[in-house]
Image: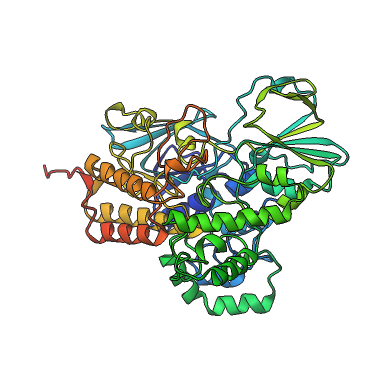
Amino acid sequence: MAQAPNVREVDAIVIGAGFSGLHATKRLTDMGLSVRAFDAAEGVGGVWTWNRYPGARTDSLHMTYCYSFDRDLLNEWGYSEVNPRQPEVLAYLRHVADRFDLEQYYTFGTSVTSAVYDEAAGRWVIETDHGETVSATYFVTGLGLVSAPLQPTAPGLEKFRGEVHHTARWPHHEVDFAGKRVAVIGTGSSGVQLVATIADRVGSLTVFQRTANWVAKTPNRPVGAAELDEIRQDYDTIWKRVRHHPAGWPWEMPTRSALETPPDERERVFEQQFEEGGFALLYNAFSDLSTDKAANDLLCDFMRRKIQEMVDDPELAAKLTPTHPYGAKRPPTTDGYYQAFNKPNVGLVDLRETPIEAFTENGIRTSAGEHEFDMIVLATGFDAITGAFTRMQIRGVGGRDLNEYWSDGPKTYLGLAVPGFPNMFTVAGPQTPFSNLPPGAQAQGSWISDAISWMREHDQAAMHPTEAAAEGWTALCNEIAESLPATSVAADANSWFTGANVEGKAVAYNIYFGGHGSHADLCDEEAASEYPSFAKIPALVEQPA
């Protein structure tokens, strides 16, 4: 695999080789900049390199879980399923890297441990875990929303004598579940996909649940050649819809209100969108499900009844039913999760009733006693959004420490830049929209490269947002989140949207809930006005002798 040359001074440094990092690297190198890029994995893929557990697949729709910047690329690649599985998404990203020869800029198997801004030189100096030091004028991160895995806080895991696997660091070899007593801790997207996939393979399966999740079925099915041809002919319309949709989906937003729709018709629409699967219930049923608590309650009541239909044991169905609004946590999608609990070899431990006290040599001890296992799978989630940043040492102007600056929650402007950190730009970072990732990563990466082009054309050495701009953006993120029933902290869903899933982490809004389309409009306005919310540092101009 090609490795970047040992260049220690470049124009730009990029971290990440997933959708965000690959696109940023392409845009910057297309500008003629010299680039060094790094990723901790052994190759391209980002989250799709690490998350290879059984059942891993995207819940985004295949035709927009890709880049749109190159029509030839769109026409030559087609996923085989509506919700592509991990191997196919990884294959797509490898195809992109090969097609545009991007691996030549990367050093893989390498983590950036620190990034410090040298004010005198106007350059970022980064250090890696292999002892290399590289400096650059521009520092671009594509770290990913979910790239910093969480480990369980209960003690004693090292004592367990069986197998231990984390869904976010799944081994490359096949894991044998046959006949084994398996514990799965966590019911986020990874946990529910894994449970639905392995329930028939194991001897017994015990699911440890802290917070019940609303789980939608997938719309997954094979995609044929004729359908792909139709999609390719309609891509202009599809990507126009994506650009304006709040979640970056290829849909027109519904205009009908759940509250104003007659009950029989409302039930028919809910049923139709439930069968459609994925995010259709949240985004394609009614216009007020995310904005009106009473409307969201109607959706929750529908889903509550669905769970009761799918789970035979009423008491177990009640434990599997969330109490938070639909959308307060990212609603995962998979097929057969609730039905898995009808199998005699599948059980549930409610951690709110009997919390885990410790891991033991033979398994897991809760407040109710010990459970013995042959394998423990940790689907314990992530220190999401900010975690990948705060696990590095990042210092800006005057030694400003990013960890300290974000101690009460992230503060950015547009989710793309941070005051006091000149020429540091973040793709899919804190305070960007929660939406279909590839379109958002492409839009943000393009905005960043355009901003760098503008600086170079206007003799600006660097720029970073003003404190007032960041405070205003943070206030707007908070205001929008508090106005929505599903995202308000009052929803109490232990969501990674707010960092509430991480013990000791400040609870703050890490997402811009105004939507992908709105965010893109605001970014366009900032660029068209020549970045008025940014403080500029002019380039030094040599005086004639």
- Tell which of 298 and 196 is nearer to you: 298
**Count of numbered badges drawn on the protein:** 0
Q: Quadrant of residue 454?
A: bottom left
> Where 122 sits versus 477, above or below?
above
> Where 532 sits versus 253, above or below?
above
Q: Residue at x 42, y 48 (%)?
A: 34
- Tell which of 36 and 168 is nearer to you: 168
Q: Position of residue 260 (x, y in %)?
A: 44, 68
314 to the left or right of 519: right
Q: Position of residue 330 (x, y in %)?
A: 54, 49
Farthest residue, direction front: 263
Farthest residue, direction right: 179
> Where 417 sits versus 95, above or below?
above
Observer able to see residue 2: no
434 to the left or right of 522: right
Farthest residue, direction left: 545
Instruction: State the colouring used for the structure image.
Output: rainbow
Observer able to see residue 185: yes
Q: Residue at x 88, y 39 (%)?
A: 179
Q: Position of residue 432 (x, y in %)?
A: 40, 50
- Tell which of 104 and 19 is nearer to you: 19
148 to the left or right of 528: right
Q: Position of residue 88 (x, y in %)?
A: 67, 58
| Quadrant for the C terminus in the image | top left
Q: Residue at x 68, y 65 (%)?
A: 81
Q: Residue at x 72, y 43 (%)?
A: 316
354 to the left or right of 23: right
